[in-house]
Image (spheres, rainbow, N blue to C red):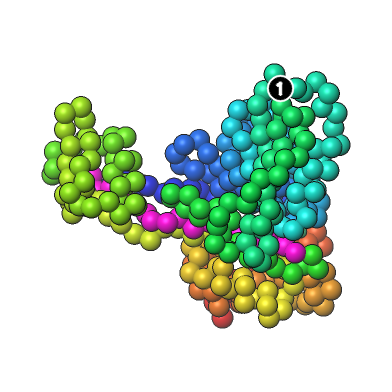
Amino acid sequence: MGDEVTWLVQPRLVNDPFSDPGLFIDFRFGRRALLFDLGELTPLSSRELLRLSHVFVSHTHMDHFAGFDRLLRVCLHRTTPLHLAGPAGFIDQVAHKLRAYTWNLLDEKSFDFILTATEFTEAGVERACEFRAREAFQRRELSAPPLPPGTLLDEAEFRIESVVLDHGTPCLAFAFQEKMRINVWREGLQSLGLPVGAWLNEAKRAVRRGAPDDSPVVVGEDRSVPLGLLKQHALRTTRGDKVVYVVDAAFHESNIARIVELARGADQLFIEAAFLEEDAQIAAARRHLTAAQAGTIARTAGVSRLVPFHFSGRYVGREDQLRQEAEAALRG
Ligand SMILES: [Zn+2]
């Protein structure tokens, strides 16, 4: 009790489970958000879209990519870049989207909006390009960021991991992994006679980078405390949250192994449950998962919470059946 609530992100599905799949990952601080998949975005406000720094696209079937235009339209005049990532071939597809518009009014005096696109394959992030408004969105090659295979993005507080699944076409699944959760214990702060404040963020950063205990943390103008004292009395470190997103995958050995590996121990697994097990043949033909298969994978991976979604329209009105089937398989 008395701990400051310090959750880093809150994920939520963009649409109802029968509409386009997408997961909006909102940060508590920093006016920032991430998005897994870029289909229909109507429920998201322009303000929410403007918070997006990175959008990760599983594959470019329309229900996963048709929101590109609205996102571009909303972000076109902003000064911070928008980063997109997708499977092999993704950069060409982004370039084609951009080429569908006339940009004759753009020149070197235009607003400086930058769009980047990277491609993730089994070898990791292999290619990257950028498109600048000031260059009328001509494509410019970038060197791919040095990241280990399996990592799409690596920041101080979290990383995004990915695997390539088979959906008849490469389809990416994503994991948001918070690196370390640091809670502030208010009573502990009080016992040290310290106020709650923005200075705590610097203390947390110091813990994350593994700074030595005698490092001074500045509290106010003429006051600092050693990091070790804070760690001992006022900071509690726990494992960070893991949120995993899986759509459009055939139920076969190599896909199952990759999903289980990615989702192992996840706090939340958002996973497609497109069909009921009674329609497993249709699911197999379309390279989608059934609800029971999704639940089985979740059980094998030891996830805490399963959120089935991306339901086939044939089950409208039978949503509970899909959820029950997934939940039953999760419980085993
Ligand atoms: Zn789909």
Q: Which residue is mark 1?
A: 108
Q: Is 175 on the left or on the right of 117, as rendered?
A: left
Residue 239 in sight in this render: yes
Percent x, y for residue 237?
30, 57
Q: Position of residue 19 (x, y in %)?
A: 75, 51
The yes-or-no answer for disc 1 within 8 Å of ligand 1 is no
Please report the bounds of the magenta region as a residue range: 170-189
304 lies left or right of 182: right
Up the image or down, 255 lies above or below 77; here it is below
Does the magenta stretch mainly form a helix, a strand or a loop? Answer: strand
- In this picture, is 294 found above or below 127? below
In the structure shown, which secondary structural element does the residue marked by tag 1 occupy? loop
* Quarter of the view holding residue 147: bottom right
Q: Splitting the image into four quadrants, where does ligand 1 fall? A: bottom right
In the rendered structure, does residue 290 fall within the stretch colored magenta? no
Q: Is residue 90 above or below residue 104?
A: below
Identify the residue at the far top of this view: 109
Is 179 inside the magenta-drawn segment?
yes
The structure residue drawn at horizontal position 13% and vertical position 43%, both measured from the top left corner, is 192
Residue type, label 1: Glu
How many numbered marks does the figure carry? 1
